Image (cartoon, helix red, strand yellow):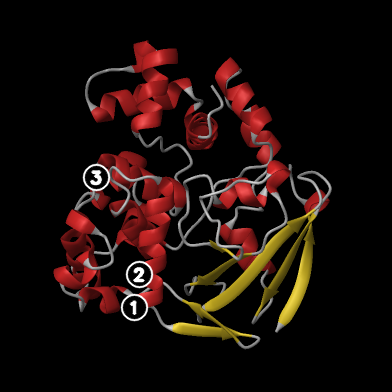
C-alpha cells in the first residue's frame, strides 16, 4: 500500500474535502465512520473517505481503491491518502484539485446570495466522477433525499460490484454496465430502487450493448450534450445536466432541481422563462455563464444545509 499527502497550500485556492464529497454532487464515496450524508462536522472534520476508482483514460487502466482524509484547515491543511498506487493524479482529477478556485469564483457575479454561500463553504470544489456511476446515481436521484440516493449506490456496489482489496480491507467497486444489465427489475427493486429499477437496468443494457454511451456527450456543444444524454432511460434534462456538471466537465451546466427552482422563484424571478431550456439559459447567464455550475452547486448546498 502506498501513502502520501497533498499540501492544500500548494493548490490554487482553498479546499474542503467534506463539502466537496458530501454536497450532493457525488454518491461514490463512503465515510469510514458510516455517517455519509447523515451528519456534518464543523470545519469539515478529519474522517476518512473511501472509494474505488473506475479506470480513467490516461490515469489508470485498473480499478483503484483510495482512502483520503483532510487534516488542518481549508487554507493550510493536508490531504492524507492511502491507495494501491500513487493517488495524487487520481485525486487531482476526481476532486478537481487542478482548478483555480479563487479565479473561478472571482469570475462569477457579485450577488449577495453567492457571496454568502461562498463564505459558508469555502473550499468546496466540483467533482469529476466516472461517467457511468454518475449517470446511474442521478437516475436514482428523483424525489430522493441525498442520504437515500447514497444508500442506493452503496447497495448496488456491495451487492453487484467487484471486490478490491487494500491492505487486507475489502472495498466494493461500482458495478459495470454488463453487471447491472444482467440484473432483473425485481432484483434491483429489492435494493430499494423502486420505480427507478427498470431505468437503471435498461440504461445499463444500452451501454453494455454499445447502443449508446454517456461519454459520447463530452465532445458535443453544451446543449447538444444535454440532449444526447436524454437518450438514456430515466434521464431528463435535470439528470443530464447533473452528469454534464459532475462528471463530464461542463462547468456552465445548471441543473434545475427543486432547490434551484426555489432560488429562481425567491431571488431571480425574471429568470423563469417557462421551459427548462429557456430558464436554464437565463439562470446560467445570471450566475456567470462559463462557471455557472460552480455557483449553482454552492447555492444548492448552502440552501439544502439550511443557510437561509
What whole-number distance in Å separates the C-alpha atoms at marks 2 and 3? Answer: 27 Å
Percent position of residue 218, x then y: 38, 54
Name which residue lies at 52% across and 44% down: 23
Tell me the quadrant of the picture where the N terminus can be found.
Answer: bottom right
Kindly identify the residue that appears in the image at 53 percent across and 37 percent down.
294
Numbered label attached to residue 160: 1
For this rendering, which residue is in front, 174 or 30?
30
Considering depth in this image, is 259 or 155 the residue closer to the camera?
Answer: 155
Location of residue 189 (image quadrant): bottom left
Q: Which residue is mark 3?
A: 227
Q: Earlier in the sequence, mark 2 or mark 3?
A: 2
Please state the horizontal and vertical placement of residue 36, each as a whole percent of the image.
Answer: 53, 56
From the top left corner, tell me how far across and down residue 308 is, in percent: 53, 21
Determine crowd level at label 1: few under 14, some 14-19, many 20+ residues with C-alpha closer than 10 A: some
Q: Is residue 111 visible?
A: no
Seen at 55% across and 62% down, the residue is 34
The Cα atoms of the two marked residues, 2 and 1, are separated by 6 Å
Q: Which mark is residue 94?
A: none
Amino acid at each position: 500500500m502506498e501513502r502520501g499527502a497533498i499540501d492544500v497550500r500548494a493548490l490554487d485556492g482553498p479546499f474542503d474535502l467534506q463539502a466537496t464529497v458530501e454536497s450532493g454532487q457525488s454518491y461514490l464515496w463512503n465515510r469510514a465512520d458510516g455517517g455519509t450524508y447523515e451528519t456534518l462536522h464543523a470545519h469539515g472534520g478529519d474522517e476518512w473517505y473511501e472509494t474505488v476508482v473506475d479506470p480513467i483514460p490516461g490515469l489508470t487502466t485498473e480499478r483503484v481503491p483510495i482512502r483520503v482524509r483532510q487534516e488542518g484547515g481549508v487554507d493550510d491543511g493536508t490531504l492524507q491518502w492511502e491507495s494501491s498506487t500513487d493517488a495524487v493524479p487520481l485525486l487531482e482529477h476526481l476532486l478537481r484539485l487542478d482548478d483555480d478556485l479563487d479565479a473561478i469564483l472571482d469570475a462569477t457575479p457579485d450577488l449577495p446570495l453567492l457571496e454568502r454561500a461562498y463564505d459558508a463553504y469555502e473550499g468546496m470544489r466540483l467533482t469529476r466522477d466516472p461517467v457511468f456511476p454518475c449517470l446511474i446515481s442521478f437516475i436514482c436521484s428523483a424525489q430522493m433525499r441525498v442520504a437515500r440516493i447514497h444508500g442506493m449506490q452503496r447497495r448496488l456496489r456491495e451487492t453487484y460490484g467487484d471486490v478490491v482489496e487494500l491492505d487486507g480491507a475489502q472495498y466494493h467497486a461500482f458495478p459495470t454496465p454488463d453487471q447491472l444489465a444482467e440484473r432483473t427489475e425485481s432484483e434491483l427493486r429489492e435494493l430499494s430502487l423502486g420505480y427507478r429499477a427498470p431505468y437503471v437496468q435498461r440504461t445499463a443494457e444500452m451501454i453494455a450493448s454499445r447502443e449508446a454511451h454517456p461519454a459520447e456527450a463530452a465532445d458535443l456543444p453544451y446543449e447538444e450534450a444535454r440532449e444526447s444524454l436524454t437518450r438514456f432511460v430515466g434521464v431528463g434534462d435535470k439528470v443530464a445536466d447533473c452528469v454534464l456538471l459532475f462528471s463530464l466537465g461542463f462547468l456552465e451546466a445548471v441543473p434545475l432541481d427543486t432547490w434551484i427552482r426555489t432560488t429562481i422563484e425567491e431571488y431571480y424571478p425574471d429568470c423563469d422563462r417557462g421551459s427548462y431550456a429557456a430558464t436554464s439559459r437565463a439562470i446560467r447567464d445570471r450566475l456567470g455563464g462559463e462557471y455557472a455550475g460552480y455557483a449553482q452547486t454552492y447555492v444548492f448546498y448552502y440552501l439544502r444545509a439550511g443557510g437561509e
